[in-house]
Amino acid sequence: EPEVTQTPSHQVTQMGQEVILRCVPISNHLYFYWYRQILGQKVEFLVSFYNNEISEKSEIFDDQFSVERPDGSNFTLKIRSTKLEDSAMYFCASSETSGGPLSYNEQFFGPGTRLTVL
Amino acid sequence: AQSVTQLDSHVSVSEGTPVLLRCNYSSSYSPSLFWYVQHPNKGLQLLLKYTSAATLVKGINGFEAEFKKSETSFHLTKPSAHMSDAAEYFCVVRALNQAGTALIFGKGTTLSVSS
């Protein structure tokens, strides 16, 4: 069964450093997403990406963050100059389409990357 | 704005007994609602979805949920718990009732199943 994969499973970095979190979405999917979950808090939407551009982003997704699909398989989240509060589990997801009002195309989630900023 | 509230952070049941995980939602329109499950070291998996069709929705692994507009609830149930059901469960609402796709998650309910 196809699945979304994420690497690394755990990333430790120093405050102020740049990190890149990597995701391989399911191969025929067209929409890609990043979510994060700070320990003890809700899973929060960060950004969605379609046709090589951001289609939607939350207020969390500021200039510190960027996303890219550098080739036909990878989808990355870059965090510039990490802060302590960026420590969280980051989930990547993908779906075939976005879905309309009466339909929902399932977002398939990866296992997450735990980012620890020291 | 849309939101969901999961009323229990932790639910403990015995194997073979019923499961009830409670969720209330707030939405300015007729919502799309979901339950996702996360097993340790696994990704989030869709259990079931409600998208304005039948109010009683059946999902995988014997779970079902009923959409009750009058109570703004979408509780998840299962008649008989299995050890493999132990996991984190998230009630989720879609942010926009159109092509917008952001999902809004509840805080999660940890289900423990004892033998």
Image: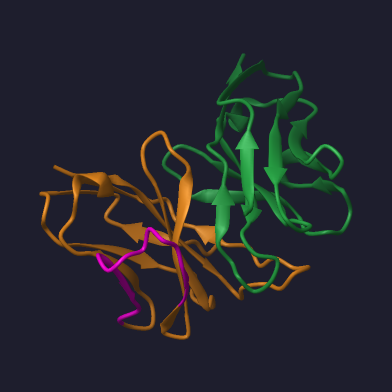
Chain colours: A orange, B green
Q: Nearer the viewer, residue A97 or B74?
A: B74
Q: Residue furthest bottom?
A: A51
Q: Position of residue B32 (x, y in %)?
A: 72, 57
Q: What residue sits 15% from the left and 62% below the top?
A: A18
Would residue A62 be counted in the magenta stretch? yes
Q: Position of residue B46 (x, y in %)?
A: 63, 51
Would residue A51 be counted in the magenta stretch? no
Please give left or right for residue A62 compared with residue B12 in the image: left
Please give left or right for residue B80 compared with residue B44 in the image: right
Q: What residue sits 12% from the left and 50% below the top?
A: A15
Q: Nearer the viewer, residue A26 or A82?
A: A82
Relative height, residue A9 to residue B61 (above, below): below
Relative height, residue B23 to residue B16 (above, below): below
Image quarter of residue B17: top right
Q: Quadrant of the C terminus of chain B?
A: top right
Q: Nearer the viewer, residue B71 or A13?
A: B71
Image quarter of residue B102: bottom right
Relative height, residue A76 to residue B91 (above, below): below
Q: Position of residue A91 (x, y in %)?
A: 41, 55
Relative height, residue A101 to residue A35 (above, below): below
Q: Quadrant of the N terminus of chain B?
A: bottom right
Q: What residue sits 67% from the left and 72% below the top?
A: A99
Residue span colored magenta: A55-70
Number of numbered discs:
0
Image quarter of residue B11: top right
Q: Position of residue A115 (x, y in %)?
A: 26, 48
Please give left or right for residue A9 compared with residue B28 in the image: left
